[in-house]
Image: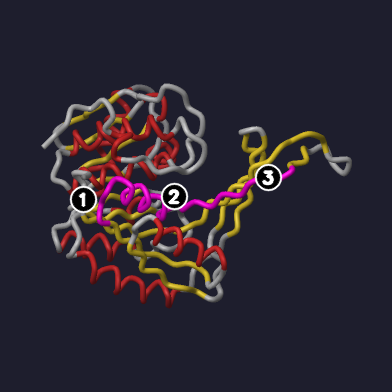
């Protein structure tokens, strides 16, 4: 049995359906200089915050997912996929909202194009969701807020405040340049481009450390974790910096890797592990999933293969 079996995670954020059309490319269209894909297989996977929840549930965590979908076929597909993954989903349906869908067309194992369908949810529905989410927080071990900039977390300050009052750690996967929204979170996980957009370009490691620590302190964060792709991850905290090198053997597709990293961080913190241990394992998980196509969930056995057993 997974040693995450007692870990209770609440994942809130922007939900989306990742839809894949796989096919063969045998000719160029006579209408335009583009390849013609003869679709042979269709796959649907949980995306965005739903992919974070899927990763947590696959590891064995008791996972609850909260978010907004449209009253449409993709929304019902998200609900069905969540149930299949063992996730307790609390979904609010907005009849005016199309569920966010990312359609990827794959030919010969290469992504040819991505088509996005999305819109902002209604404010009244967001207010109703906020009250229900805050009521659930005290029963959790960790709150994960997965921000993809689609509008589901525009009341994020209230969620962080409710978690702090309940003494529940908050992990935020950020988006955009307004990081003041995330003030008071336990752990913030920007990638290089996201952090650079907020603090500017750094010239060396010392400059990066200074900028990252200043941001962490100004926001009242316990930790700031910079995910650095082929450079690994660097954790900035009151104790200083902690760096782990990348473990990816071959990068095939980075889609959803950040979701996996956040899920593993949440699972580890929920179990009471140190943030350094959490970062080390999350780095390992990220190195595994970037070697696969599309948004995927890593299993407990796969994550811990070759890792000494723990009690």
- Mark closest to the chain's N terminus, 2 or 1: 1
Relative height, residue 59 to residue 134 (above, below): above
* Residue ranking furthest to the front: 1
Extent of the magenta region: 38-62
Disc 2: CA contacts within 10 A as few (<14), some (14-19) or many (>=20): few
Name the foreground residue: 260 vs 160. Answer: 260
* x and y percentages locating residue 24 in the rendered image: 71, 37
Q: Nearer the viewer, mark 2 or mark 1?
A: 1
**Tag of residue 40:** 3
The residue located at (42%, 48%) in the rendering is 177
Q: In the drawing, does residue 1 fall left or right of residue 196?
A: left
* x and y percentages locating residue 151 in the rendered image: 45, 62
Q: Which residue is mark 1?
A: 5
Disc 3: CA contacts within 10 A as few (<14), some (14-19) or many (>=20): few
Q: Which residue is mark 2?
A: 176
Name the foreground residue: 234 vs 179. Answer: 234
Relative height, residue 37 to residue 91 (above, below): above
Name the quarter where the N terminus is drawn: top left
Q: Label 2's element?
A: loop
């Amino acid at each position: 049995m997974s040693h995450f079996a007692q870990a209770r995670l609440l994942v809130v954020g922007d939900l989306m359906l990742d839809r894949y059309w796989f096919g063969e490319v045998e000719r160029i269209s006579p209408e335009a200089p583009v390849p013609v894909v003869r679709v042979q297989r269709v796959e649907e996977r949980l995306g965005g915050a739903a992919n974070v929840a899927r990763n947590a549930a696959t590891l064995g965590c008791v996972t609850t997912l909260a978010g907004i979908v449209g009253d449409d076929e993709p929304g019902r597909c998200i609900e069905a996929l969540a149930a299949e993954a063992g996730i307790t989903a609390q979904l609010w349906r907005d009849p005016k909202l199309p569920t966010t869908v990312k359609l990827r067309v794959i030919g010969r194992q290469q992504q040819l194009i991505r088509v996005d369908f999305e819109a902002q949810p209604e404010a009244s529905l967001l207010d109703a969701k906020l009250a229900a989410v805050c009521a659930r927080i005290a029963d959790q071990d960790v709150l994960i807020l997965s921000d993809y900039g689609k509008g589901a977390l525009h009341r994020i300050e209230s969620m962080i405040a409710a978690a702090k009052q309940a003494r529940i750690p908050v992990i935020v996967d950020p988006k955009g340049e307004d990081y003041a929204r995330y003030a008071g979170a336990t752990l913030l996980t920007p990638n290089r481009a996201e952090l650079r957009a907020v603090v500017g370009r750094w010239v060396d490691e010392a400059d990066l450390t200074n900028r990252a620590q200043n941001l962490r302190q100004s926001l009242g964060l316990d930790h700031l974790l910079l995910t650095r792709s082929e450079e690994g991850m660097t954790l900035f905290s009151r104790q200083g910096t902690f760096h782990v090198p990348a473990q990816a053997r071959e990068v095939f597709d980075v889609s959803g890797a950040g979701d996996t990293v956040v899920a593993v961080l949440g699972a580890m913190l929920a179990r009471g592990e140190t943030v350094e241990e959490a970062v080390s394992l999350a780095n390992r998980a990220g190195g595994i999933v970037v070697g696969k196509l599309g948004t995927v969930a890593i299993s407990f056995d796969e994550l811990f293969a070759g890792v000494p057993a723990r009690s």
